[in-house]
Amino acid sequence: MTRQVYFAEQALFPQGWKTNVRIEVENGLIHSLSSDASPEGATLLSGPTLPSLANLHSHAFQRAMAGMAEVSLNPNDSFWSWRDLMYKMVHKLTPDDVRIIATQLYIDMLKAGYTQVAEFNYLHHDPKGQTYHQLNEMGLQLAQAGDQAGLGVTLLPVLYSHSGFGGQAPNEGQARFINSTEQYLALHQASQDSLAGHKLHKMGVCFHSLRAVTQGQIQEVMAELGQASNKTMPIHIHIAEQQKEVRDSVAFSGQRPVQWLANEIGLDERWCLVHATHLDQNEVTAIAKSGAVAGLCPTTEANLGDGIFPGVDYIAQGGRWGIGSDSHVSLSLVEELRTLEYSQRFRDEQRNRLYKEGEHHVGDYLFQAARQGGNQACQVNLGLEIGNRADFMVLDNRHPFIAASKNEDLLNRWLFATNENLIRHVYVAGNQVINDFKHQAEAQSNLEFTALLKRLFN
Ligand code: NGQ
Ligand code: ZN
């Protein structure tokens, strides 16, 4: 048995801040928690201590092209022209490349305060579309990257069969993604077998989008994987990110994407609807009522010109949501949460848009809601509660805004008025993975990632 004891003068619980908090960890889990406690025999945490968050949406390989698509090639550059560039890069990546990118990315995620990531992986085959010797080769590389960094991966093998609504044949750029339902179920089983019993990694079910799968396929996979013991596995899908997708959905079925999913398949707490950007009032209500999580990726959605999520209406109805860094143009939960709130302000020409009854501090609302939604979508429990994994982070109290803030102002100061990374130490399952902004594997990872970028882009 491993046992650690930590002490923080200030720590954020699900109910709010408490002082002089003693955190006892056994075998990676929080065994006991007490406030107004004594520091005797404990390792002192040097600043305000917060739970880390689960990042609910990632395509790790896209980190390699972050910032490389900001060149105007045509006056109508869009999500779809960005996707063409992304497909060009996908073509070049080997399994080793994916591991190198993901290792660097996951170290950067830990530094940013994410300790679990839902990896929405649709890169399955070699560039000719042939399966690798190991069916879940890419999933293994991603899990290995998670192990090297010390971050938990919620692996979501993705079912991707078609290029558009109604089972349209895939296009050439999609060759590495394509599986039949049968192949997908075999891939999923292989992934479950290889991650079974792993301390940090989890599994979920995933459909790329309503463009990429048919109703029959969703039903078949749900019948196989949504049963008995697996009933709690999260189910992720990209939904309604672009207006074109909504128009194509209506043209195909007479229904908008979320409307169709709610009516024809049914929504519940297992679902994570990634992006869910374009919703009418009925769809807002359908998601909010179902307990599903809206998987918001504010910096990527801004970068790709997706549109603005109807956050005010959704939250007024109790809607759940979490944050994903998706294409990884930003690895900063400060920037994600701030962009989300500011998107609402831009649209409404008003201030302080996202909060709830009983929590009028925007930063506190945003942080706690993102924590809960990320947990639900990634199948983890991050937060200072007994029985949870002992993941937490320590802010740098040498910064005046951190050192001088009263409890109720601290998250607002941090989230709305700082830009430099202030996450100084990070712990996963009781072990320190970031010490004074540094990760023990970063020097080696930087070298390998730099060489790879030069090979890909020079
Ligand atoms: C993806 N990314 O699968 O990586 C997508 C783009 C698509 C985002 N939606 C491709 N941000 O949706 O077809
Ligand atoms: Zn995505």
Image (cartoon, rainbow, N blue to C red):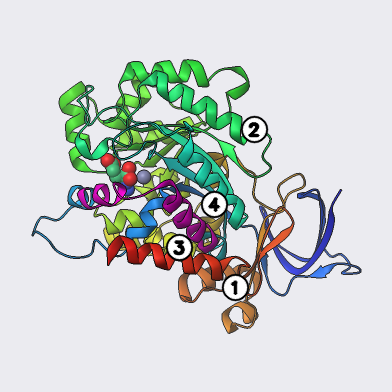
Q: Toward which corner of the image does residue 405 lie, by quadrant?
A: bottom right
> Nearest the camera: 101 or 431?
101
Residue at the far left in the pictured view? 75
Q: Of helix, strand and loop, which one carries label 4?
A: helix
Q: Which mark is residue 85?
A: none
* Mark pair 2, 3: CA separation: 29 Å
Q: Of helix, strand and loop, which one carries label 1?
A: loop
> Nearest the camera: 57 or 434?
434
Residue at the far right in the pictured view? 40
Residue under circle 4?
Answer: 145
Nearer-N-terminus badge (2/3): 2
Residue under circle 2?
Answer: 196
> Nearest the camera: 259 or 87?
87
Verify whether residue 266 appears in magenta. no
Q: Toward which corner of the image does residue 263 lie, by quadrant?
A: top left
Q: Of helix, strand and loop, which one carries label 3?
A: loop
Tag 3: residue type?
A: Leu
* Mark pair 4, 1: CA separation: 19 Å
- Residue 307 left/right relative to 321: left
Could one spot residue 233 in this view of the protein? no
- Residue 388: where, in percent of width, then height? 72, 46
> Nearest the camera: 4 or 256?
4
Residue under circle 3?
Answer: 331
Nearer-N-terminus badge (4/3): 4
- Residue 78 left/right relative to 260: left
Residue under circle 1?
Answer: 437
- Residue 254 left/right relative to 449: left
- Mostly what secondary structure, the magenta segment? helix
Nearer-N-terminus badge (4/2): 4
Report the magenta residues as a range: 84-108
- Residue 397: where, in percent of width, then height? 65, 79
